[in-house]
Each structure stands twice: as C-alpha cells, then as structure tokens.
Image (cartoon, coloured by chain):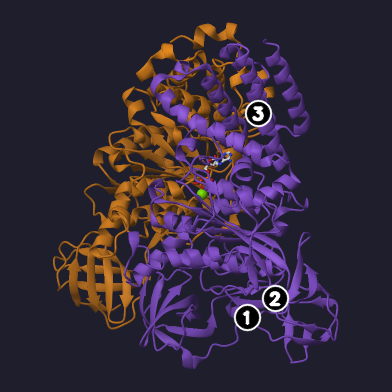
Chain colours: A purple, B orange
Amino acid sequence: MSKATDTQSDTDTSGVIESVSGPVVTARDLDARMNDVVYVGEEGLMGEAIEIEGNITTIQVYEETSGVAPGEPVVNTGEPLSVDLGPGILDAIYDGVQRPLDVLETKMGSPFLDRGVDAPGIDLDTKWEFEPEVSEGDIVEPGDVIGVVEETVTIDHKVMVPPDFEGGEVVSIEAGSFDVTEAVAELDNGEEVTMRQEWPVRKPRPSVEKKTPRTPLISGQRILDGLFPIAKGGTAAIPGPFGSGKTVTQHQLAKYADADIIVYVGCGERGNEMTEVIEDFPELEDPKTGNPLMARTSLIANTSNMPVAARESCIYTGITIAEFYRDMGYDVALMADSTSRWAEAMREISSRLEEMPGEEGYPAYLAARLSQFYERAGYFENINGTEGSVSAIGAVSPPGGDFSEPVTQNTLRIVKTFWALDADLAERRHFPSINWNESYSLYREQLDPWFKENVTDDWDEIRQWAIDILDEETELQEIVQLVGKDALPEDQQLTLEVARYLREGYLQQNAFHPVDTFCPPKKTYLILTATKTFHDEAFDALDAGVPVEEVQSVESVPQINRIGVQEDYEAYVETLKEDITEEIRGLY
Amino acid sequence: MKEYQTITEISGPLVYAEVDEPIGYDEMVEIETPAGETLRGQVLESSDGVVAIQVFEGTSGIDRNASVRFLGETLKLPVTEDLLGRVMDGSGQPIDDGPEIVPDERRDIIGAAINPYSREYPEEFIQTGVSAIDGMNTLVRGQKLPIFSASGLPHNNLALQIARQATVPEDDEEGGSEFAVVFGAMGITQEEANEFMQDFERTGALERSVVFMNLADDPAVERTVTPRLALTTAEYLAFDKDYHVLVILTDMTNYCEALREIGAAREEVPGRRGYPGYMYTDLAQLYERAGRIQGRAGSVTQIPILTMPGDDDTHPIPDLTGYITEGQIYIDRALNSQGIQPPINPLPSLSRLMDDGIGEGLTREDHSDVANQMYAAYAEGENLRDLVNIVGREALSERDNKYLDFADLFEANFIQQGYDTNRSIEETLSIGWELLSTLPKSELNRVDEEFIEKYYVEEDAETAEVTAD
Ligand SMILES: Nc1ncnc2c1ncn2[C@@H]1O[C@H](COP(=O)(O)OP(=O)(O)O)[C@@H](O)[C@H]1O
Ligand SMILES: [Mg+2]
C-alpha cells in the first residue's frame, strides 16, 4: 500500500485533525471505515483508522508526528492497510508498512528517516521475464498458477490468479517481458492478471485446509534438531532475558533452516542487528542451494526507535508475505524478533486510546492477537492444490526475565515448541543457552518417522538415552551441591562425567565458529554415538573394577568436545570411538 | 507570535492552556511568570482549543496570569564545531563565561532514526586498556555499551579511565579522524560533576569535549532534554564533522525518574513499577543514536551509566536498557569491597559486538577462544565457591580445586589492574594465557589446538609466578 499506487483520494471523505498525542491523532468529519489507510496532515503522514466514535475517527500514525497541528487535513484512501505482493519481495528490506528502506534512503537523500515519503513495496518499473504455464483456452481458478518469473537465482516466483478473482477461461497469455502492473493474462470475464496483487495484512489469505505437519524444519542446531525439533508449518517461542541468545538463535535459523523462503521480522529491536543481516546474508551461502542467502530472504526492519504504530503492523506485513509464498507451494519460515515489542506497541496505542487495560497494562485483546498471528502458521493445502507451509518462530522478551508475565504466558498457550533460554547458562557461556529441562517440543513424536527414515533407525532411542543421562545429572547435582562430588558412589560420578560431555560436546554449539555453526542431523547423531561409546565402555570398565579416576582420565575422551568443529566428522568420530574403546579396555 | 494568558490548570510539571489557533505537537513554548522569569516547555498533547505543556524548569512560580508564547517550532539546538571545549547547562545554555556561540545550524533535538539500511556494522576494536573489557567484553566503535552500577560504586572512575585511555590501535598508526567526548550529566551531584570536570581539565580532554550539565538541584523535567542535546551534538560532530565521538551519559536512572514523574503528572496508566509503558521506546530513541553510517567517517559510541535501584538488574531501568544496548558492563559490589579495581564482574557482562571486532587482523587470532575459555573457567570456579563453603576443599576433586584457584587468580591478576594502568590487548591476552595455563591442556576445549600449541605456558617456566597464592 502506498500513495504511489493509490488512485483515490476523494476530498469529500477527508476530515480535519482534532488532536495530536504522539502516534495517535483524532480527526473530525473523516468518512472512513475501520482499518482504512489515511494520510494525515499537510505532510501526508501514513496512518490507519483504529477507532470510530460518532464523528471522531482515531488514527494510529506510522510516522513521527512532531509539529503536526489540529486543523490540518486528513485524507482517506478508502482501502485497508495492505501489502504489495509480487516479484521483488525477496532480497528486499522493508519498514513495518512495507516501504523499501533502500528506496527511502535514495528518495530522502539522507541516512536518517525523514517523514512523509512513500514508495511502493515492489518496484513498478522492473521488467520480469514471464513464462506462461497455462495456455489460451485453459480454465483457471482463483489461486491457480498461470506462469513463473525468475525472482532470484534461488526462487521461481509463481504468478497466481488472485484469491479474490472469479477466474475463467484464459483468452490471452504470452511469454515476454512485463512490469508488475502490466496484464500478463486476460480472462474471458474481463479480469486481467498482473504480477502485482494487493492483500490486506490483517486478513489471512485463504486456504483449503491445515494438515498435520510431519517434516522437521532442520535448523542445523543440535539441541533443536536433536531434542526439541520444530516442524515445517510449526510454531515456536524463544523467551529469554536480554543477552540470553534470542537473536542469535533467530539468526541461526534464518541462515541454516532448510526452508525455501525466510521472512525475518525485526520488530522493535536493534538497528545494528538488521544491518548485520543486510551485510552478511548476501555473502553467506544458502545451505540448500549454495546461492546467496539473501536470494531466499525478505527482511522487515522496524527497529526500536522507528515509529511504534509501524511496529504494531510489521508482524502482519511479515506474515502476509509469508502466506503469499506459501500459496506458491513453498515452505516459508518466519522469525519475529521480538513479539514482546509488538505487544508493547499494542499496549502503547491502547493506552493512548484510553482503553481499559488488562494484565500489566496490555489490552484485553492481547491473547487474541497473539493466537491470530500464530494461527496463520501451519502446513496448508492451498486453494490451487499445492501444499506449502509457514513456520512461525517468535522471540519473547519478558521484563526482568520473568516467564510468568502475560506475553510469555499467552504465547505458551498457543505454540507447540518452547525453547526456554536461561540467563545462568548464558553467564557461563553455555551457548545456545537453551535450558534442556524446561524446553519442550510437542512435534517430537510426529517427526520421529522422518528422522528414522532419513537419518538413522535409532534416532529416538539414542535421544532417550541422552535425555535420561541429563535428567539423572540434574538430580545428582542437587546432592553434589550438598556433599561434593567425591562423596558420590563411583557409578554416579561417572554418570556426571558423561553428562558433562553431553553438555559440552553436544548441547553447546558455537554460532561463531565457521564449522560448528551448522550441524547436519547426521553429525548431531554421531556426537551422541561417540558419547555413548564412552559411557558404555566406561561402565564396563567400572564393573571390571577399574577405579573411576582412571576411567575419567582416558586421554582421547575430551576429543568428544571437538567433534563439533570437525569438517570431516564421520572419519573423526570413527577413529575417536576406536581410540576410546581401545584405551579404556587397556585399563583392565 | 501570539501571547495567551489562558492557563486553566497547573499540575506537577504540566500546564494546560486554552488556545484559539492550531499548535503543533512537540512545539516549543515560553512561559513568562508574573515575576518576570521566562520558563521553557514543550507541547505534550495538542487538541482543538487546549494544549498540555511540559515545563522543563518545573512549574513553580507559574500562576493563571502567566503568559504563554508558542514558538512555532520544535526544540532546536544550535550546533557548531565551536561547541568543543564548552560547558552548557542541562537545557543547552552556556555556563562557562565563554564567547557567544555562533551556530552553524540549528538541529531538532528529537533526532530522526537512522535508516537501518544506511548503517554500517560496527567492527573497529577500541582498546580501553581495561582487561576485563578489552579481553572479555570488547568495545567497538559505534557501540552502545552501558555501565550497570549501583550507588556507592566507582562507575565514574571506570568511565573516566575509558575516556582517558580509549584508542583505536589502527588509527594511531594511520592518523584517522579526531576523537571527541560529549558528556551529558543528568541529576548528578556537584561533587560528581567536579570529579569529571577536574579530570577533563587535568588531562586536557576538555578542549575536545562538549559538556551538558543538569545537576541534582536542577529541574528534573529538564533531564528529559539533556541527553537529547548531548546526542544531537554527538551526531553533528560525528556525521557532519567526521569526529569519533564518545558519549558518556550519567545517570540514566535520573533520566528515567524524570520520565516517571511526567507520566504520573499526566495521570497515564503506569507500566511496571510505575514507569511509563513507553519507556522502552523512549530509551531506544536515545540509545539507538549510537552507530556508524555508510560513507561517513565519524562514529557515535555511547557509554551510558546507570545505577540500579536496590542493586537489582531486573528493575525496569537496567532491564529495558539491557534489552536495547549492545551489551552491558557490570560493576560488582562484592569485588569492590575486595578492593578490586575496576570491580567489573565479567560473568553477567556482555559485549554483543565483540565477535566481529576481534580476531586475526583486528586484535589477535586467539582472542575469542581465550575469552570463551576464561568465561567458562571463571564461571566454574565461581560456582564451586559456594560448595567449598559447605564441604571444604578436601571434599573436592583435583580438577575442582584447579578451577577454584583459577577464579582467585583471575580476579587478582586479570580484573585487578587499577584505574591508571593502561594495558595493551597483547598484555591482556598474555595474562589470560598465564591463567589458562594453570589448567591442564585437556580442559581447554574452547581453544583451538593450534593456539594451545602456540600460547600455552608450559609449567616449569611459569610455576613460580602464577601458582603463588
Ligand atoms: N549459539 C551461540 N554461540 C555463541 N555465542 C552466542 C550464542 N548465542 C548467544 N551468544 C552470545 O550471547 C550474546 C547475546 O545473544 P543475543 O541473541 O543477542 O541475546 P538476546 O537476543 O536474547 O538479547 C551474543 O552477542 C553472543 O555473544
Ligand atoms: Mg535480541
């Protein structure tokens, strides 16, 4: 949605500003429907009607309002807040209302964000090479793919009949070079299909049905894939205090998740974190295709210092873009960092509207908004018969790190994967600081068949073995805190030692190490097998009467902690297992 | 310009007045009291016929007969390179008897957000000469790295040490842009202010500094303006005049108290512990004014200082700050009472921009591994201290005892250095290796084997020096 593509601005429907208070403006005599986009004041700042009471319309303004005064005009576009959908979304970086930040920089002629400047979400002049996939005489229905353009080296962009068309017989279609506003096909009822569609962000795009997800979204992060996997089409939350690893985890997913498309929403967080993505992603390789990561990525950056109303809308902009690529049959993963900032934007607007506050000042509709958002994720059968998915992963930033607060609690009621970050682990530089006792994935069992078929038969068995050891460690640690380790029986001391290797060599993973940063499921599995070899051999030795100190000081064992950084890990693990076995057996 | 004598209500720092013309949101206001004093303020809410004004100097002396003038523009600061060397009060008026300031330009103090697309990722190592920072929580140019302190702790000494010692090793060789300090004080005592001013004067830093002082007995509401003046100056010097600017803002806690006071006067629905619900956004609009911009030579690096009420880092002020800034440096009360200078606790401290600013060609190849290993080892030793108190050292394994020793040595040799010692990064890392070498090689699983070969200090050579305890 942008002025650049708008045609109506009827003076009959325009009104006059009555009051201004930060991002909230009221207008008199404005003829608007709820959620219509309006232009506010002499500078035409973009806003949205969010409350209508008698003759007074309340508007949230997506830009700074300093200097705006009562008496200035407000003009209604008559259309709800929408995004421009079409080729050009990938490899782009937007603000919360889909204005391309690179275009804004050029138009404003400054690195600082000015206001009252607008730009369409996708470039209107770029020519794309269109290849038809249907012929004249074919009948097409809403959602059907009629052709493709190569959007990036990685992604073929499917040109679809918009869901709100009637559909009919194709009367003209041909290959060629088109911009996004030119008709690439004409139907017998006069409908013209262009590459560009508009879709109102607050309305989910239609689908046939949601299916049970059965394929994992492989993240290349051991603790996630190994213990708490998320499905393609699944939902996950990462709550944690500041500095515990929410953003690094989200970035790791954006880099290594085996999705076709990544939509990364920086919602009310740091500017430099978005800059990092903009600088790194064009250089980094997509693990799936080897192409630059940016070729599968769309970024939405509404940082903490950018207008709060646009922060409220950035989540919707992101999820609508995700649904659009899902409709093409792609697996899309959306990361939102942080959903708490989104909730706070709702709270800020709500309090300016003087709505009755709910828990901790959040509006009463907080829970509903959160679940509406996560409900837009899923594994879908699309209206064109293809299957596609949207996985949604939200960071949560609880005040004071206290998970009992409303955003965390309401999120946990909805999502099926919970990656609980832990400040204590972060302080010890145990990364990723995901607490293995508190986290869970409700997808674990339904994804096991996939892992057994694609990685190894005993995926679930060895995982259970690791979980049991870690559980036992947690219990033993309580005793150790009272009496010290040396007071424990030898077998329990040994269990603690095995658990330490699980923590250091398996659960920990350094996102900044060139090799360790990405761990394929096979390697995740092999690290466990090496640790289990140590466990089995060590307990045999203990049974044979070897003192625990001797078993613990076997020289090759600490190499378990170095498997993560090995490129040629299969050979390394093979040798390591042999060495461990040989050395321990040599003790008796 | 129209004058109104239409004040209808005075409440805390707020004044409500009736108007018969449209007044812009955030616009500047002057109020003349019957005693002839002129106070300044800003429009907080503007509706047809009535405006709410926040008065910076406080509302005392204002009555219904005071006259109100609307200046037709938002608050602007005259900027010029000549601000260097000058001392202003918390609302930007010179207090140093210097010459009149002839502005180059007048800048809106609210400041526009930097387009994330136009930023350049900060990655130039700043050597502060403080091991706990350089070695473990490296600062880079354009970073915002606050000091989390509490009352009675020596955060000012540390801030001054950083301001004195900070250099960029590369620049020293090549002669890069000039360095400047912008100091914004909010509600600090005269004594603290003197501490800073005397140090600036003693070291000759004042010439390249711009100082904005709002002291404890200055109006509280003015504190909402002071950091914006400081940052507007910093942005001008950095992005128009190519300076590398270090901004020290102290004490952010006083700034937040002022926000709370205004919120309460407006009868807003309060957020956590009475602070406004928009405090995150408000603080972000300050802290995010640090950074680098593509194609501009200068940079704005921020070191805000805050004192945590009740030493509690879950309090909204440190909590929201930590959520916005690129890490934090904790000053620790226990280390301070042990006499460690500077008493930085590295465990909860963090520099989020460290990873890209260090390593081969920037600091040294082994830097990241050394830092990670020292973190893990110190954390392990720290953790065991509680246990030792219960079961005694004898009940611990040999391995555990090594970690306990490590923690002690780490505090005594690495963190402890004094406020006048300036250590190069080489020195910092070599102290690190001496300490790590008290642990067996097999324990150093976060360090690349190649670096262990190269830097590990074999026992016989160093025993005497490092195991003395
Ligand atoms: N997987 C990881 N590997 C290495 N370091 C990590 C990892 N996760 C987090 N960190 C460290 O923790 C810091 C804070 O992480 P970040 O994701 O920014 O925290 P949050 O978003 O929760 O505030 C990072 O700057 C980095 O130093
Ligand atoms: Mg983060």
In which image quadrant can residue A68 be found? Answer: bottom left
Of the image marks 1 and 3, the number of the one nearer the N terminus: 1
Instruction: Give the chain of mark 1.
Output: A
The residue at which mark 2 appears reads as A124
Q: Position of residue B415 (x, y in %)?
A: 44, 25
**1 and 2 marks in contact (CB < 8 Å):** yes
Q: Which corner quadrant holds the N terminus of chain A?
A: bottom right
Could you tell me how far apart the alpha carbons at marks 1 and 2 are, in whole angstroms? 9 Å
User: Quick one: SS at disc 1?
Assistant: helix
Could you tell me how far apart the alpha carbons at marks 1 and 3 are, in whole angstroms? 62 Å
In this view, the residue in front, A225 or A79, is A225
The residue at which mark 1 appears reads as A5
User: Quick one: SS at disc 2?
Assistant: loop
Query: Which disc number belongs to residue B291?
Result: none
Of the image marks 3 and 2, the number of the one nearer the N terminus: 2
Question: Residue sitting at 34 percent across and 61 percent down?
Answer: A359
User: Disc 3 vs disc 2: which is toward the camera?
Assistant: 3
* In the image, residue B110 above or below residue A536: below
Instruction: Give the chain of mark 2.
Output: A
Question: Residue sitting at 61 percent across and 79 percent down?
Answer: A4
The residue at which mark 3 appears reads as A532
Question: Residue sitting at 36 percent across and 72 percent down?
Answer: B25
Instruction: Give the chain of mark 3.
Output: A
